[in-house]
Image (tube, rainbow, N blue to C red):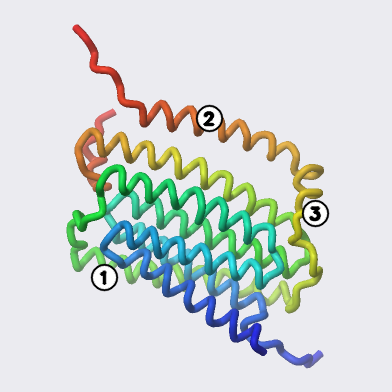
Amino acid sequence: MNSVDPTFATSIDFYVILASILFVIGAFGVLIRRNMIVLLMCIELMLNAVNLLLVAFSTYYGKGDAQIFVFFIIVVAAAEATIGLSILIMAYRNNKATDAGLFKNLNG
Amino acid sequence: MSIELLTLIIGGLTIGAALMVVISKHPIRSVLFLIVTFFLISSLYILMNAQFLAIVNIIVYAGAIMVLFLFVLMLLNLNKESEPKTPKLVLFSSIVASGILLLVLIAAFKDSIKITHVHLPQERNMGLVKNLGDLLFHKYIVPFEVSSILFIASMVGAILLAKREKPIID
C-alpha cells in the first residue's frame, strides 16, 4: 500500500489549494475595492476558481460531466457580465461615478 | 518531472496575477491582469487534458467578456484613479476575514482530498470536443436549450437597461 507518492503538482491537492487561494483572492477584492467594475472582475475571478476546481475533479475522476458544468458556468457568467455592465452604465449615467457606495442612495 | 515544475510555475504565476488584479489601482491594469489570469488558467486546463474548455475559456472569457469590460471602461472614460483610499481598519479586517475563509475552505476540502485518492488523469481523451459534445447533446440537452432562453433574457435586459430613456414631455 505504500506506493510511490507522486509529486505535489500532479496530485489533486495542488489544484484544490490553488482554487481555494484564487477564490479567497476574489473575495478579498470584493471586500476592499469600491469600484463597481473591479467588483465584477473579482466575481469573475471567483467563478474561475470554481471552474478550475471542477475541471480538476473531472479530470481526476475520468468523467466529463463536471466539464459540462463548467461550460454552463461560463454561459451564466457571460449573461451576468452583460447585465452587470449595463446596470453599471445606468448608474454612471445617473451620478457620474461607479463607486459601489452610491447604491445606498437607492430608495425603493 | 518538467511537467510538475511547469504546473507549479503556472500556479504561482496565476496567484500573482490574481493578486495584481485586486491590488492594482488602475481599472485598465486590473482588466489586463485578469486576461493574463485567464490565459494561465487555460494553460492549466491544457495540462489537465481539458482542451475544449481551454479553448472555450480563451474565446469566451479572454476574448468576449474581457473585451466587454475594456469597452465599458473606455466608454465611460474611467481609466484614472478615482477610487477613494480604503480605510486601514477595513483593509486589516478584510485580510483577517479572507485568511479565515481560506482556512475554512482548506479545512473543508482536506477530507475530500483524502477520499479522492486518485493521482493520475484516468482517461486521456475525455476533454476532447467529441466526448464532451456527445455528453452535452445527449445527457445535458435540456439545460443547453434552457441556457438559450437565459441568453435571450439577458440580451433583452441589457438593451433595456442601457437604453437612454427619452425625456418625458409634459
In front: B163, or A87?
B163
Q: Residue B50: image x %, image y %?
A: 69, 64
Which residue matches tag 2? B153
User: What whole-number distance in Å separates the C-alpha atoms at marks 3 and 1?
Assistant: 49 Å
- What's under tag 2, amino acid-wise? Ala
- Vertical placement of B137 versus A90: above or below? below
Q: Which residue is drawn at 38% across and 37% down?
A: A86
Q: Residue at x 80, y 65 (%)?
A: B125
Q: Residue B75: image x %, image y %?
A: 30, 43
In front: A20, or B125?
B125
Q: In which quarter of the image is residue A16?
A: bottom right
Q: Residue B30 carries which label?
A: none
Disc 2 element: helix
Q: Residue at x 20, y 40 (%)?
A: A96
Residue B27 placement, left or right of B152: left
Mark 1 Cα shell of 10 Å, populated few (<14), some (14-19), many (≥20): few
> Who comes first in sequence, dot 3 or dot 1?
1
Chain ID of residue with mark 1: B
User: What whole-number distance in Å separates the C-alpha atoms at marks 2 and 1?
Assistant: 40 Å
Callout in the foreground (3, 1)? 3
